[in-house]
Each structure stands twice: as structure tokens, then as C-alpha cells.
Image (cartoon, rainbow, N blue to C red):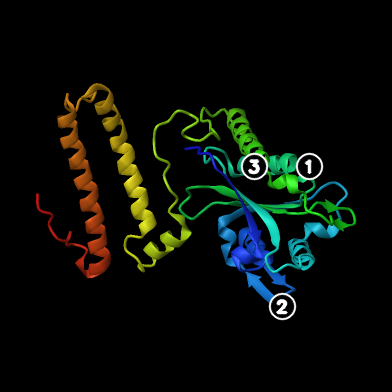
Amino acid sequence: MAIYRLEAKIFSREKRGRSIIAAAAYRAGTKLRDALQDKVYDYTRRMKGVVDTTILTPEGAPEWAHDSGRLWNTVEAGEKRKDAQLAREFILAVPPELSPQSQFQTAVEWARKELVARGMAVEVSLHHPKNSKNPHVHLLATMRKLEPEGFSAKKPREWNEVGQLHQWRESWAEAVNAALEKAGRPERVDHRSLKDRGIDVEPQPKIGVAATAMQREGKVADPERVQAVRRVKLLNEVRPLLKSIRKLGEVKQHGVGTTWWEKSITFMSRVREVATSALKKTWRSIAGPERTKDDGPEISR
């Protein structure tokens, strides 16, 4: 289903610990040479996950800026500070209900209107993960304006203002909804926070690529990030129950019990199911494939 996401962050030497050329090569699934470090970054093996990629530049920008290697090597060479901010990255969720062509075009049009029109050069890459879930777009945008004679001497500070980020978030939601409407789809997204929409739930934290990799590779059976997500899910399940108890002294039911204590029994049964499932999963990862038929230790009732 369509979900909203616009994540914006600054790519700097200090925080990322690698060159912007490496980042550009990875996101576009290409092979680029970092002239400053005299090192080649080859991510062509990722091409299957990269559906499409392009570079957008302001009107009158030099032709070399359409070459990814030259563009980002020029950015890298132009920044002298060891903690220099090299690029701004946007990560945009695109609706799986749209075709890949429509997903890419929606992101390209938004980037032209909101970023390139302000003077940024932007590399746009559409990713479709192997599991076919969570299609998204990476935008790498320059921190300086790209003019006919090269990059501007100063970085526009207004691009870093909180109000500007809020405007970008709202305009991306509008772009996604317009694309869904054009495709005849009923789904819509909302850039507002859960609190601003009056939805009384705890935001679910991201598991993140590091925790996912640790779990996939068997380094950690149940990473803290995964535990945190389960914890929030359980809290959100019980939240309506507690709210109803505080307000009415009982819980309104739809086929499962009539009072709060009957519902609590059902809820605790659900907690036990989740805990049992987690324990069995951990047991299987420790025991190894030869023990897959064994569901692990019994849990006392």
C-alpha cells in the first residue's frame, strides 16, 4: 500500500566517512573513480535493483555536469574542509500501486520543480528491492548552485531552514497524491505526523539496514531494533484498551468479551503468542538447520 516518506539528510565527509563518489556509484549502480583518493568504486552488480537513473541540472549548466563521475568529483575537489558538507540526500517512498515509469517520473518532476529550479544539480535513482517491497527513490543534490561557469562560491543557507523542509514534505505528498489520482487509484498519503492527524499511536521505529543485516547473517538472533519494533506494536495494540478503561471503566467489544477483564485475558494471550514466536525463532537460529523440526523448549502455562 502507498506510504509516505521523505527523509532528508546531509552527506558529509565527517559523518559518512567515505566519498560522495562512492555514494553516487552505489545509488546508481555504476562504476566511478574517486580522483581525490585514486580509488574505484564498482557497484555494477547492484544494477538489478536500480530501475532507472538520471542527472538533472539547472538551465545553462555546463555539459560535464551530466556525467556522474565528473559531477561528484568536481563537488569533492571543491570542498576543502575535512568535515565539508558534500550533498543533500532525499529518500522518497513511491507508491507500489504505480508503474515503475510513473514512480520515476513523479520523482523526476518533483526534483525539477523543488530542487533543480533552485539551482541544484540532482542525481535521481529509482530502487526496487529484491523482495519487491518498499520501492523508493534516492536523490543526491548539490549543496551549491550549479551555474554556467561552475558551482557558486557560497552555499545557499535558506536550503537548510526547517520551514523549507516542511514545504518539501508537503509538496512531495501533493505530488504522490496527484500521481495516484492520475492513475485512477484511490490510495492517498499524508505528510503530517500521527499526532497532527489525531491518530493516537506510538510511531514505529525503523529497524535499519544494520540490524537487518545482523539478523540475516546470523550475527544477532534478535537485534535490539527488532525488539523495539515488536514492543511498539504491542503498545499500540493495548493503547485503545487502556484508553477505554480510563474513560469508561470497561472496554467496548466487537465479539470478544464485554468487559475490560475479559479483553485483558485476550490481550495477554496475544502477548504470549508473540513471546512464544520470538522464543522459537531464536531457538531455531541457535540450534541450526538440523533442529528445524524441533519447535524448541516448551513455555509453561
Quick check: can you spot residue 14? yes
Q: Position of residue 25 (x, y in %)?
A: 65, 64
- Judged from this view, the residue extending furthest toward the front is 246
| Disc 3/disc 2 C-alpha distance (Å) | 37 Å
Q: Position of residue 35 (x, y in %)?
A: 75, 73
Q: Secondary structure at mark 3?
A: helix
- Residue 38: numbered disc: 2
Give the foreground label among 3 and 2. Answer: 3
Q: Which residue corresponds to the image point at 31% horizontal and 41% vertical from the top-left? A: 235
Q: Considering only vertical position in the picture, is 234 above or below 44?
A: above
Picture quarter containing residue 214? bottom left
Q: Position of residue 139 (x, y in %)?
A: 66, 51
* Amino acid on which the number 3 mark rests in the picture: Val
Q: Considering only vertical position in the picture, is 257 above or below 172?
A: above
**Who is closer to the viewer here, 259 or 82?**
82
- Does label 2 or label 1 sit earlier along the sequence? 2
| Disc 2/disc 1 C-alpha distance (Å) | 33 Å
- Residue 117: numbered disc: 1
Give the foreground label among 1 and 3. Answer: 3
Label 3 Cα neighbours within 10 Å, binned few <14 / some 14-19 / many ≥20:
few
- Residue 162: numbered disc: 3
- Residue 282: numbered disc: none
Q: Answer yes or no: do the residues labelled 1 and 3 have beta carbons within 8 Å?
A: no
Q: Is residue 201 left or right of residue 246?
A: right
Picture quarter containing residue 237? top left
- Does label 3 or label 2 sit earlier along the sequence? 2
* Amino acid on which the number 2 mark rests in the picture: Asp
